[in-house]
């Protein structure tokens, strides 16, 4: 089956999450992704933990369907190998330390004259210029710089996102930008440079709270798992000790909620709660009313009433619940991919065209494809052995 990116070759000097997440999306859609890694240790995300049968959870997540080439990019022989790799590549992706790609001769400025069709995507914490250009940037630090931490958590207890949200934001913007660049190249015949900043990606995702606080107005209140400005919208305990998430969007739903879920129709017109702003201001009082009504019901009963009333709701699932989620099972979203530790479950990428079978190949062992890739570049077995003896690969 034809995939959208069949025939596209991507060279990536990547580590951690942002760039690997981007290039895994490219690989899912058929691109050949060659991942250049340090000899001996590789991408440092390989060592984050050993939770997946001895492999790192982050690494297994973002590195399927790639080829691993070990190369000491500072070795005297490395420049020849890198140049040969880039010579017929469509895309070069890197999220090395600030300035490292330039020192290796892998900047767009250094490559574009020789390879005018090449697309170079640089992913960094703060971008290619400006006063923060050289600062190190990790996911939590960007969550902080972007203002995300200031609006997440509970009063007096700011909280980070439980997943690498800033890395994911940058990776997805990089992926989309590369697709745009490939389309543009198809019309112009020319490559380009893409400069993706984790900070800018994360601030883009902060649009609603930024506008809410425009002109020095107060920001959204810290409200834990509840919505900062709409109420009731968040977690409520049922009588069996489990938690139900629910959300109301308008006054019609508030009336239905009172009548069919709380079975207290007169509450709909209570002047303490008859607009969203009043309900939001009186959260503690209304929370007590809702908890009291739910205290005689189990989770299934609460959800049944909410569903009957057409009120949006969800269970607060554990991660173990998600592995067995009935909706994912019914839609057959799970596949298996190979790893050096055996087959592992992997979720199909969301939103794939129905005419495309996503690529779901193995997660590479460190340096698994080194000899084969160098062989393609014209290196003999003896030359490859010599490079390995010299510590270049």
Image (cartoon, rainbow, N blue to C red):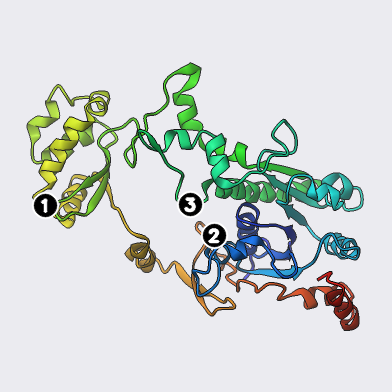
Callouts 3 and 1 close, C-beta under 8 Å:
no
* Residue located beneath label 2 in the image: 353
Callouts 1 and 2 close, C-beta under 8 Å:
no
Q: Residues within 10 Å of mark 2 (few under 14, many from 20)?
A: few
Specify the quadrant that holds the C terminus: bottom right
Numbered disc in front, either 2 or 3 = 3
Residue 117 can be seen, yes or no: yes
CA gap, disc 2 and disc 3: 27 Å
- Give the quarter of the image for residue 48: bottom right
The residue furthest top is 215
- Give the quarter of the image for residue 331: bottom left
Specify the quadrant that holds the N terminus: bottom right
Task: Identify whether 161 is placed above or below 348.
Answer: above
Q: Which residue shows up at 61% across the image and 38% down it?
A: 199
Where residue 27 appears, as percent x and y from the top left, is 64, 63
Which secondary structure lies at badge 1? loop
Task: Identify whether 259 is placed above or below 89.
Answer: above
Where residue 351 appears, as percent x and y from the top left, is 51, 56
* Residue located beneath label 3 in the image: 163
CA gap, disc 3 and disc 1: 33 Å
Which secondary structure lies at badge 2? loop
* Residue located beneath label 1 in the image: 297
């Amino acid at each position: 089956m034809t995939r959208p990116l069949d025939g596209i070759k991507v060279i990536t000097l990547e580590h951690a999450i942002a760039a690997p997440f981007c290039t895994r999306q490219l690989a899912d859609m058929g691109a050949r992704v060659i991942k250049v890694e340090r000899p001996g240790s590789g991408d440092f995300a390989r060592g984050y933990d050993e939770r997946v049968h001895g492999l790192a959870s982050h690494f297994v997540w973002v590195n399927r369907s790639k080829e691993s080439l070990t190369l000491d990019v500072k070795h005297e022989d490395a420049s020849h190998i890198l140049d040969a790799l880039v010579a017929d590549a469509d895309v070069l992706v890197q999220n090395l330390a600030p300035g490292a790609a330039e020192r290796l001769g892998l900047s767009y400025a250094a490559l574009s004259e020789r390879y005018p069709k090449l697309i170079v995507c640089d992913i960094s914490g703060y971008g290619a210029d400006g006063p923060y250009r050289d600062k190190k940037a990790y996911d939590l630090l960007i969550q902080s710089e972007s203002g995300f931490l200031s609006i997440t958590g509970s009063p007096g207890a700011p909280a980070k996102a439980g997943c690498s949200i800033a890395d994911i934001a940058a990776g997805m913007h990089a992926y989309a930008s590369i697709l745009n660049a490939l389309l543009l190249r198809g019309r112009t015949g020319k490559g380009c440079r893409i400069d993706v900043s984790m900070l800018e990606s994360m601030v883009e995702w902060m649009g609603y709270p930024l506008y809410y606080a425009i002109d020095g107005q107060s920001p959204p209140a810290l409200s834990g798992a509840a919505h900062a400005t709409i109420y009731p919208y968040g977690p409520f305990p049922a009588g069996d000790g489990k938690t139900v998430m629910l959300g109301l969007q308008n006054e019609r739903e508030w009336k239905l909620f009172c009548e069919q879920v709380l079975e207290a129709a007169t509450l709909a017109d209570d002047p303490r709660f008859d607009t969203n702003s009043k309900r939001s201001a009186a959260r503690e009082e209304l929370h007590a009313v809702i908890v009291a009504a739910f205290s005689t019901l189990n989770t299934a009963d609460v959800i049944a009433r909410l569903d009957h009333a057409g009120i949006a709701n969800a269970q607060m699932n554990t991660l173990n619940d998600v592995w067995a989620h009935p909706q994912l099972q019914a839609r057959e979203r799970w596949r298996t991919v190979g790893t050096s530790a055996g087959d592992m479950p992997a979720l199909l990428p969301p939103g794939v065209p129905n005419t495309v079978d996503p690529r779901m190949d193995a997660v590479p062992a460190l340096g698994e494809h080194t000899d084969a890739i160098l062989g393609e570049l014209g290196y003999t077995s003896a030359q490859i052995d010599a490079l390995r003896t010299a510590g270049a690969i």
